[in-house]
Amino acid sequence: MRVLIDENKCCGAGQCVLIAPRVFDQRDDGIVILLDQAPPKELHAAVREAACVCPGAAIALEERE
Amino acid sequence: MSCIEVKPMSADLIAPLTMTRTCPHAPPAEHRRLRAEAPVARVKLPNGLTVWAVTAHEHIRTILSDPRFSSNRRDPGFPYLTRERPPSSDLKRMLLELDPPEHGQARRSVLGEFTLQRIRALGPRIQQIVDEHIDAMLAGPRPVDLVQAFSLPVPSLVICELLGVPYADHEFFQTRSATLVNQNAAPEEVGRVVGELMTYLGNLVAAKAQNPTDDLLGRQIARQRESGEVDYQDLVSMAFLLLIAGHETTANMISLTTLVLLQQPDKLAALQRAPAKTLAAVEELLRYFTIAEQALGRVAIADVEIGGVLIRAGEGVLLLANTGNRDPEVFTDADELDLERGSRNHLAFGFGPHQCLGQNLARLELQIVIDTLFRRIPGLRPAVPEDELSFKVDATVYGIREFPVTW
Ligand code: HEM
Ligand code: SF4
């Protein structure tokens, strides 16, 4: 899995940081930071959930089998 | 998926729609019927307005994310639920009412105040506020109205903390903000109190400009200084928005949460055995009550097709998120309160760029309340049965008006 973020779409409510704190963080100004572009398997479910609930559609996933 | 084929209601068929809630535990039957039969439906509100009612989770998300639906409450097509059109206002539009690109700019200027890290730093103070109010309840008479003794003052003081209202002014701030959300207060009184709060916030901002403090308003002043002029009006209106958006919402969630957990002691007991599950429970309670549904209106500013239905520019849309949050396509046993469901894919904070800015603060407050209230008052129970409680059935934010409890 590869994670891509679009800072311009981020509206900073921090859902991703709450759900997957090892993959996402926030800058001091509230915008998302990607901590891990290729998170390990055990985090995939949380990352998918973060992408699904992100209100700004700022998280994109490239999934490979 | 249902095996019965449901034909979409034709768009020119206009169904009457009530927005009055019937019960704290489920959306009105009429709204649920719409979701099954016509998830994007033309409806006539009791005030005579014809608008679109959207009840499917998927369509609600789509509309709230689409910039062709505007939040401009002053647009003539914007749906309102009051009997009369709200009076026009020449005040500067608040964050909640802005569209892109202004909305993104305004939101980004305060976003840094709501990072998870900043919100978590408020935790110990929130805990202290919660404990103090429980101390006072325990020392006072029984039964007591939970709304006045606990649900309302706690979030009001948390906003004091957030904004940096000095301790000596808490009493003033709290009594005024209580009047603001009191549905029984006379309109003149509310008007007077809004004036007092605005003056107070104006003075507060001016004082912080003189003596910088390390709190939301202090930091915003410093930020604005760096980039030029300090816009006092802007800061006062931001502070006021945070007060109205963060006070009654959280208060109503506290009362409803307390009610439902006291009604279902097995669920409460399970939660008390495993406090790590509180955050998931908060998420489910938010979904189950979806108290701010009536805040979710939009107006189309272009023709847009949603779910095979054409919504034309200028037409108003109501996003019935309480019903969307019971959508069987998204939630299994959607009508069950399942505190371990663990789904965050709900619409209680809205969706899209306006999604609640204070959501992590609200979550933290509710989490602390749940972990503290039932532990410190183990015999807590409603002093009257549910059918004697008065619910805010047609208010902008759903809740309980008065909730006598004892122990
Ligand atoms: C359980 C409590 C709460 C609920 C259910 C709630 C619900 C909502 C909803 C549904 C919206 C979206 C409105 C729209 O899209 O038009 C919203 C926006 C907002 N909320 Fe909350 N809210 C809660 C608590 C808070 C708190 C504690 C604060 C801050 C102290 C807050 C501040 C805001 C602000 C500033 C907005 C506007 C954001 C924007 O337009 O970009 N809310 N809230
Ligand atoms: S969930 Fe989306 S909008 Fe919210 S902080 Fe993360 S990336 Fe930004």
Image (spheres, grey):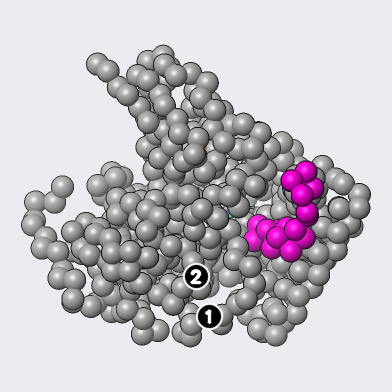
Indicate the chain on which mark 2 is placed: B
User: Would residue B219 be visible to someone looking at this image?
Assistant: no
In the picture of the structure, the residue carrying the numbered disc 2 is B73
**Residue B369 at x, y percent in the picture:** 63, 46
* Magenta span of residues: B225-243
Instruction: Pick whichever, B271 or B318, lies toward us.
Output: B318
Q: Is the same chain shared between marks 1 and 2?
A: yes
Instruction: Pick whichever, B360 or B90, lies toward us.
Output: B90
**Residue A2 at x, y percent in the picture:** 37, 20
- Circle 2: is it few (<14), some (14-19), or many (20+) Cα within 10 Å? many
**Residue A21 at x, y percent in the picture:** 53, 26
Q: Relative to B79, does residue B247 appear above or below in the rendering? A: above
In the picture of the structure, the residue carrying the numbered disc 1 is B86
Residue at 54 percent across and 49 percent down: it is B104
Q: Earlier in the sequence, mark 1 or mark 2?
A: 2
> At label 1, which amino acid type do we have?
Pro
Residue at 39 percent across and 43 percent down: it is B345
Indicate the chain on which mark 1 is placed: B
Q: Relative to A19, does residue B294 appear above or below in the rendering? A: below
Element at label 2: loop
Looking at the image, residue B197 sits to the left or right of residue B384; the answer is right
Instruction: Pick whichever, B303 or B28, lies toward us.
Output: B303
Residue at 75 percent across and 58 percent down: it is B231
Marks 1 & 2, CB-CB < 8 Å contact: yes
Q: Nearer the viewer, mark 1 or mark 2?
A: 2
